[in-house]
Image (cartoon, rainbow, N blue to C red):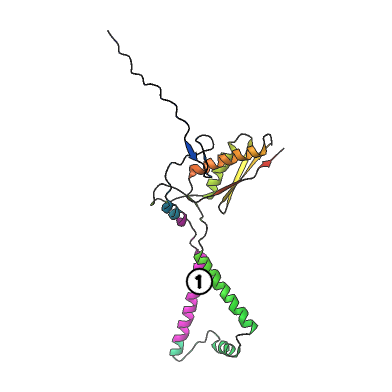
Amino acid sequence: MSSQGDPREEPRPIEPAEEVPDAQGEAGPAGAHRAPLSRVHDKVADRAAVRAFRPRRRVPAVVVAVLLTLLGLLVAVEALSALTGRPLRLAPYDRMAGWASSTLWSDPWFLVGAAIVTLIGLALLVTAIVPGRPRMVPVRSGQRDLVVGLRPKGVTRALARAAEQVPGVRSARAGLRGSTFTVTPTTSGWRGRDEFKQDVRDAVLTKLAELDPAHPYRVAVHVKERR
């Protein structure tokens, strides 16, 4: 009874570590504190995700809509009442017309009123044009039609937990302000401050790269020593 030996595969040579860009755009070996990019970034999808979570400016829009509606109703009521021969005169038109006809363009009160109205109009215009910051953290989904957003509190908790995995960190907290994640690790000061700060920053950047946000964020680390 003969037996055949199992075919053996020849050992494959060990390939060198792949160079991948880190969160700051610098190349480094794939390994600790580095997250390789798993998918190609689609700029169109990124812009769509960011726009999807921007605030709609509802409060200024509601204020302007209410004011214009009330003004339109006032004009309509006054016009209809005047046509029927019984003007309501809800607004003091006679006094307003008399003040306008007797006031010079150079009058200080007129200039102040015009400046205030102009500033209010410009503020409303800027509020409508300038987009607000997203209330969610948009992340890449790999598809243009699929928009994903994470709550900022959830992202900051994940970054804080990532910082707590670094040796020497007793606790950590993170927050988001604008486009910057601020991480504050607490340590006993047994390591070099610069090296410790860089390790924490690398761990946080790795976690942030895993989440793959569609909007670029900065990471600031402020070390807090506790004796």
Residue 75 drawn in magenta: yes
* Along the viewing direction, whichever of 172 and 37 lies nearer the viewer: 37
Report the label total.
1
Name the foreground residue: 179 vs 155.
Answer: 179
Residue at the spot 51% in from the left edge and 63% down from the top edge: 130
Q: Furthest residue to the bottom?
A: 85
- Residue 159 highlighted magenta (yes or no): no
x, y percent for residue 189: 69, 36
Q: What segment carries the magenta color? A: 50-79
Q: Which residue is mark 1?
A: 64
Where residue 110 sits, quadrant-wise, is bottom right
| Element type at mark 1 | helix
Residue 108 in picture, x, y percent from top left: 65, 82
Tell me what residue is drawn at x 57 percent, y 90 percent: 101
View extreme (left): residue: 1
- Residue 71 to residue 17: above or below: below
Q: Quadrant of residue 8?
A: top left
